[in-house]
Amino acid sequence: MKQFHFFQLQKNNNLFLDKQLISFNIGLKNLKIIDNFVKKLFELNENRKFKSLHEVQRLLNTTSYYKLNKDLDIMTRLESFILKCLKKKILNKSIIGVEFPINVRIVHPSIPNQIKKRYSTTSIHCDPWAGEPDDMINVIINLIINKKTSKVKIVKTTNKEAKLYKKLSRTYKKKDFLNSKKYFKELRKLEEKDTYNIKNVRGQTFVFGGFLPHYTYNKGNEVRLGLEFRLRTKDPFSTLTRWKSRLNRSGRYWYLPNKNHKDFLSKINDEFSMIKRKSKKKLFLKLRKQEIKELNYKL
């Protein structure tokens, strides 16, 4: 699998908890910069200033569901900074694409009614089982987390088991594996397996293969805040079947940027320049423009 190659090329063995699981803390200095980007998003949403991201969490603790609008210029600068941090740690030539915009995860203590239970992350799952690309790698960065919030748990998985879980995602072609009877049979086995002893603390970053089952463990009464996104080890345009799908739209995956960008237009121009080198550039440009439209951005 493509994911294996990404982990095999890693040079810093101290970051590994297992063959497909990397864990490190992004550091206080970087965390403060990330906090400011995320805080700015909430300030635009609420039309008010916040002293800190902890103050944002206190607001979120009074809600049962929260919709955060994402300013694309801020999301572009956030992406550039996150990728800069990751390049120093783990990014290598295996990574070709990245999910944009990065998902600002707001995890309430109980599942909001607006979220369909069958797609709840509290069930043990691999993202490709719900239609995400099978070459993806997960990235999670904890921002606000404590003993009163939920946390992520990752099931201990060998490379052999990861290959089996990949096959399961192809079992049902007309519906997501998560909605199949076979899933609930496999779920009983997964529930008996041990999970990794990971640090669920502020700034802790987890990078793991797309076929390591994981889930949200709900507890406490406070909101957890974090960043989550996926890296691609295949060309983003290698998966076109779900390009415009309402759920897990594959159009969300862009080429890994060649440089840091200060605004969304700069990112678009960089993306277009990479697409124009491809043999199917007319089709790819059309598809990318469709995705830009989905983001409510006018070219």
Image (cartoon, rainbow, N blue to C red):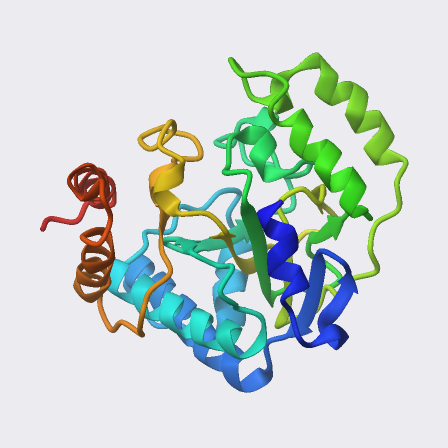
Residue 181 seen by the camera = yes
Left-right relation of 21 to 46: right
Q: Residue at x 55, y 30 (%)?
A: 130
Q: Is residue 236 above or below residue 184?
A: below
- Please state which of residues 243 and 36 is positioned toward the viewer in this rendering: 243
Residue 236 percent across, percent down from the top left: 38, 45
The residue furthest bottom is 29
Left-right relation of 163 to 197: left
- Please state which of residues 99 and 241 is positioned toward the viewer in this rendering: 241
Q: Quadrant of residue 197?
A: bottom right
Q: Residue at x 53, y 78 (%)?
A: 31
**Total marks drawn?**
0
Q: Residue at x 22, y 63 (%)?
A: 270
Q: Quadrant of residue 256?
A: bottom left
Residue 248 percent across, percent down from the top left: 44, 35
Residue 294 percent across, percent down from the top left: 24, 39
Left-right relation of 219 to 113: right
Quadrant of the snapshot with the N terminus: top right
Q: Quadrant of residue 8?
A: bottom right
Residue 222 seen by the camera = no
- Please state which of residues 149 and 119 is positioned toward the viewer in this rendering: 119
Residue 222 percent across, percent down from the top left: 64, 55
The residue furthest left is 299
